[in-house]
Amino acid sequence: MSRTITALFDTRADAEAAKNRLEAASLEVSHVDITDKTSTGYTDNLGTGTTSPESQGFWASLKGAFSPGEDRHVYEEGVRRGGALLTATVHDNDTDKAVDILDNANSVDIDGRANDWKQSGWVAPVAASGMAAAPIAGNRTTGANEEMIPVVEETLRVGKREVERGGVRVRSYIVETPVSEQVTLRDEHVSVERRPVSGGAVPADAFRERTIEMTETDEEAVVAKDARVVEEVVVRKTAEDRTETISDTVRRTEVEVDNVAGTDTTRGAMTGSTTAGVGLGDKIAGLAKEGAGKMTGNDELERRGEVQQGKTAI
C-alpha cells in the first residue's frame, strides 16, 4: 500500500532541493510533483474571498494529496503567497522516513504559518480547496427557536523529527619518534712496511718489474624501515529504538444543563403530569442532562440527569 504526503515550502528552490533529497534516499517513492503559481491550471481571485472555478478544478485535481481532515485552504494560501507545494506517493513502510526528510528540508510548519496569517488578519475562504466546505460544528444552522452549543474534544497527535545530539570525530596524523640501534661495522686498512734483510738469498726474478695492489674495504650501515599494522580504530554507529511517553493535556467541552424554575412550570394542560413526584419540567431537564452526559462521556452529568428524572435516588 502507498500514501500521498504533502509539504509546503516558501520557495520552489527549497521544494526542488527536498525533491532531490527524497529521490536520493533509498525509499519507495514515486510521483514526486511540485506545484506553485506557475503550474498549469492555477488561477487566483485575490481579495475576493472565493476561489475561481478554474482554481477549484486545479485543487480538485490534487485532492488525493490531502487527508479529509486537513485544511486545504491553508496550503492554497501558501501557494498563493508564492510558496511551492510538494506531493509524493510513498510506500506505507517508508512514510515516516519520507516525512522526516521533508521536515528537515526547510518545509513550512503549516499550523504555525496559518496562525501567523490569522493574527495578521487572514480569514480562511469558505471553499478554498475547490470542494464543498465541510460543516463546522460551531457554524451549523439552527431553527428560529433553537440555540446550539458545540461539543468539541481535542486529541493528542505526536510526531517525530531528527535532531543532532553530538557525535565523535576521529582523525589520524603522523608522529615522528627518534629511535637508535647499535650495529658493528668492520673497517680494513692497508699498511706498507719496509724491513731490513741481510745475507738473504736473491730470488731468481728479483730484477723483474711487478705491481701489487691491495684494496681496503669498510662496512657502513644501511637503514630500511618496515611498516606493520599494530592496531585498528573502527568508527561505528548503532541505532536502537526507545519508547517515550509524551504527556500533555487535551481539552473538551462539557455541557451542564440546569433547570431554571419559572412562575408556573406546569403550563396549562400539562398540570399534574408528574412521575414519582418529579415535575414534567424537571423530567425534561433531566433527560437533557442524561443525553448530554452520554454524548460527552460525563458519567456524573448522566447520573445527575437520571436523579432529576426520578430514575435514581440521590
Image (cartoon, rainbow, N blue to C red):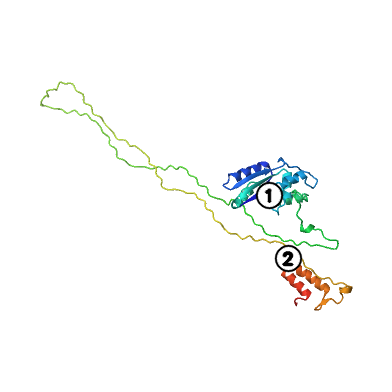
Per the rendering, the mark at residue 296 is: 2
Q: Is residue 203 above or below residue 179?
A: above
Q: Position of residue 238 (x, y in %)?
A: 52, 53
Quarter of the image with the C terminus is: bottom right
Label 2 crowding class (10 Å Cα cut-off): few <14, some 14-19, many 20+?
Answer: some
Find the distance from the CA under tag 2 to the CA under tag 1.
33 Å
Question: Where's residue 68, x and y in %?
Answer: 70, 53
Q: Is residue 167 left or right of residue 113?
A: left
Find residue 64 and name its label: 1
> What residue sits 83% from the left and 72% below the top?
281
Closest to the camera, between mark 2 and mark 1, is: 1
Residue 248, by quadrant, is: bottom right
| Amino acid residing under circle 1 | Gly
The label on residue 9 is: none
List x then y, in percent, for residue 228: 39, 44
Residue in the foreground of this view, choosing between 103 and 24? 24
Q: Nearer the viewer, residue 216 or 282?
A: 282
Label 1's element? helix
* Residue at horizontal 67 percent and vertical 43 percent from the top: 34
| Residue 110 placement, left or right of 27 | right
Three-letter amino acid code at the position of disc 2: Thr
Q: Nearer the viewer, residue 195 or 131?
A: 131
Q: Residue 15: give x, y in percent of width and height.
A: 66, 43
